[in-house]
Amino acid sequence: MQDYQTWRDLLSDLIKNPRQRKKIARAVEIDTETLVAWAQHTGTPSHQQLHMLLQAVPQRQMLLRTLIEEEFDAFADDRIDELPHIASIALSARVLELYASAPDESRFWSICTAVLAEAVKQLDPDGLGISLSIVQCMPSEDKTVSCLREYIALGTSPWLNQIEIRTRFLGAESLAGQAVSSGQQQIIEEINPGQRLMSNTPEHVVSAAAFPIMHSKRIAGCFLLASTQAGYFSAQARQELMQNYNAMLPLAFPPRDFYNLEQIALRVMPTFEVQQPYLSTFQQRIMATLKTAFTANRAISYPEAQQHVYGQIAKELLQLHS
């Protein structure tokens, strides 16, 4: 695939064919000479014309938009301002409906997946690469929160583009940990290799953001976002949109899952690579827990067995790092 240095280089390639040149010029409502002038760096389109140009080449729209934003900084802000600050009017209504009608055992899943699905569409309309996940507080036996668990996730390539259960433990070293410990949003515009290692940041992440999920000064976890693009979460309009989605998430959590900030005492968790062998035994440990409960003639549900095993693994990982 050809490597284009500027949007004008790409445009020059797109209009080599005279018939295609006329078609694009007609769609942008200009003559072909003007189109050639743009490609040859002797003319500059207006922002409206740039938007029309994008619509005229849907097959190369994402790359063209990225290259245009490298020359015209304000163009990226124009696009952000177009984000519907609540296509979430419909989503808000849907979330409230789920809060009122969903059974207790499925309310968390229903609300979180609805919010993530809409947020991915609005925050990454061009599929540049975004990952969104819900992170929960993990209480210890003494009711303090010593670590967090990343649970439900959704994204666009290079991440999985369907809802997934993403079990990973995070602690004081992570951006999520900083957001939960402080009760304040955290944003990293560009992650350097040293930060990636120290903050337990996955591969492909270039910028990241974390918004604490709070109700009445109590905290249940955070809304964690990652992008393949530097500075992706810095624009004010995009931050407002993220805050709107985050504001809906407290409705997913039951009151017992919120903790006072004084109860947050996060510790450092091992890397994801170290965690993996422990997590790979998750299902076997659940079955063993259910079997033990059955043998002891003790009633325990599958979700309760899950929570018990999560707690076991978290405790072992914390001890391991100590």
Image: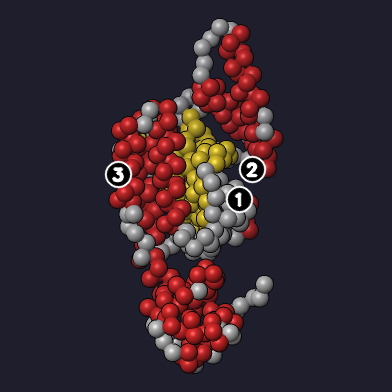
Callout 3 touching callout 1 (CB < 8 Å): no
Residue placed most toward the observer, 12 or 256: 12
Tell me the residue at 36%/52% (across/down).
243
Distance (Cα) linking label 3 and label 1: 34 Å
Residue 116 can be seen in this image: yes
Residue placed most toward the observer, 102 or 25: 25
Residue at the spot of label 1: 202
Distance (Cα) linking label 2 and label 3: 37 Å
Which quadrant is the C terminus positioned in? top right
- Graded by Cα atoms within 10 Å as few (under 14), some (14 to 19) or many (20 or more), the crowding at tag 2 reads some
Callout 2 touching callout 3 (CB < 8 Å): no
Callout 2 touching callout 1 (CB < 8 Å): yes
Which quadrant is the N terminus positioned in? bottom right
Residue type highlighted by circle 3: Ala
Q: Which mark is residue 149?
A: none
Is the residue 172 above or below the residue 22 in the image? above
Is the residue 127 above or below the residue 303 in the image? below
Residue at the spot of label 3: 93
Give the residue at the far front of this rendering: 19
The image position of residue 50, as x and y in percent, is 43, 78
Q: Is tag 2's residue or tag 1's residue first in the polypeptide sequence?
A: 1
Side (left or right) of 281 relative to 181: right
Distance (Cα) linking label 2 and label 1: 8 Å
The image position of residue 88, as x and y in percent, is 33, 51
Residue type highlighted by circle 2: Phe
Tell me the residue at 30%/44% (across/down).
93
Residue at the spot of label 2: 272
Q: Is tag 3's residue or tag 1's residue first in the polypeptide sequence?
A: 3
Q: Is tag 2's residue or tag 3's residue first in the polypeptide sequence?
A: 3
